[in-house]
Image (spheres, rainbow, N blue to C red):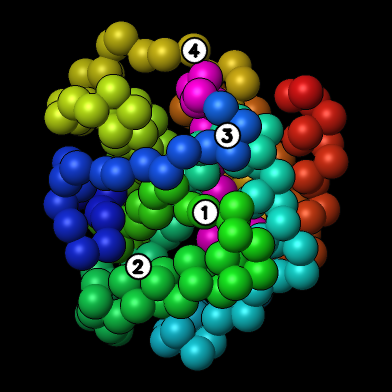
Amino acid sequence: MLPCRDGVGLDAPLELLDLPNGKWTGNIAFLDRDGVLNIGSEDYINKPEDLVILPGAADCVARLRQAGFRICVVTNQSPVGRGLWSSENLSQIHEQLRMILLESNSDAILDLILHSPWAPWDGSWARKPNPGMLEAGRQILDAAENSTQPNLLFDEKWMDRPDESNSIMVGDREVDMIAASRYGVKGFRCNSQVGISEVIEIILGGTA
């Protein structure tokens, strides 16, 4: 029960766009989706038209990339696994998310979006609070940067891990902070009604 990407296999080639201010040094900003980039809902974001971007989210994504971070969205999406709607529908939602962010700020590029389609009772390593999506995100982004094929490893099978002291995780729920701790990155928790803009100055002040 691994993480998933939209419309392609987990280890499919990923094309990265250049960062605004030079070569990537390995820092990743792992971002939850709902409550961080867009307004969440107890009834889920069920279609692209449901998306409402939180104020300042696009500018925050752009600022992170300008500060040298690759952006990896990591989002639990159990409606897929529970058959409420399809992975194709989720892909359309994420296409809309990318479009709205870029319309607001041309530097607000999401380098990679990963989701866990599994229900809480499935016990998947990919579902937060487990760190499987963060593990996959690091390996996929590293492989893309080096033009190599990722050989994805998880949990105790992944022994040769990089230094993550300058990578971060932003989320609005405790499961996000637990996933950050289990993976070994600093977690920043935000108010779901405010989103990433609530913590962006702390993040950039702490990593400058």
Mark in front: 2 vs 3? 3
**First in sequence: mark 2 vs mark 3:** 3
Q: Which mark is residue 78?
A: 2
**First in sequence: mark 2 vs mark 4:** 2
**First in sequence: mark 2 vs mark 1:** 2
- Work out whether residue 128 can be spotted: no
Amino acid on which the number 3 mark rests in the picture:
Phe
Q: Say whether residue 194 is left or right of residue 35.
A: right
- Work out whether residue 98 can be spotted: yes
Majority secondary structure in the magenta region: loop
Q: Gap in Å between the C-alphas at discs 4 and 3?
A: 14 Å
Mark in front: 2 vs 1? 1
Residue position for label 4: 163
Local packing at callout 1 (Cα closer than 10 Å; few below 14, some 14-19, many 20+) is many
Residue position for label 1: 109
Q: Is residue 88 above or below residue 15?
A: below
Residue position for label 3: 69
Mark in front: 4 vs 3? 3
Q: Say whether residue 154 is left or right of residue 190.
A: left
Q: Is residue 7 above or below residue 189?
A: below
Q: Which residues are magenta?
A: 23-36
Tell me whether the residue at label 1 lies in contact with that at label 4, contact meaning CB atoms closer than 8 angstroms.
no
Q: Position of residue 179 (x, y in %)?
A: 50, 38
SS for tag 1? loop
SS for tag 3? loop
Mark in front: 2 vs 4? 4
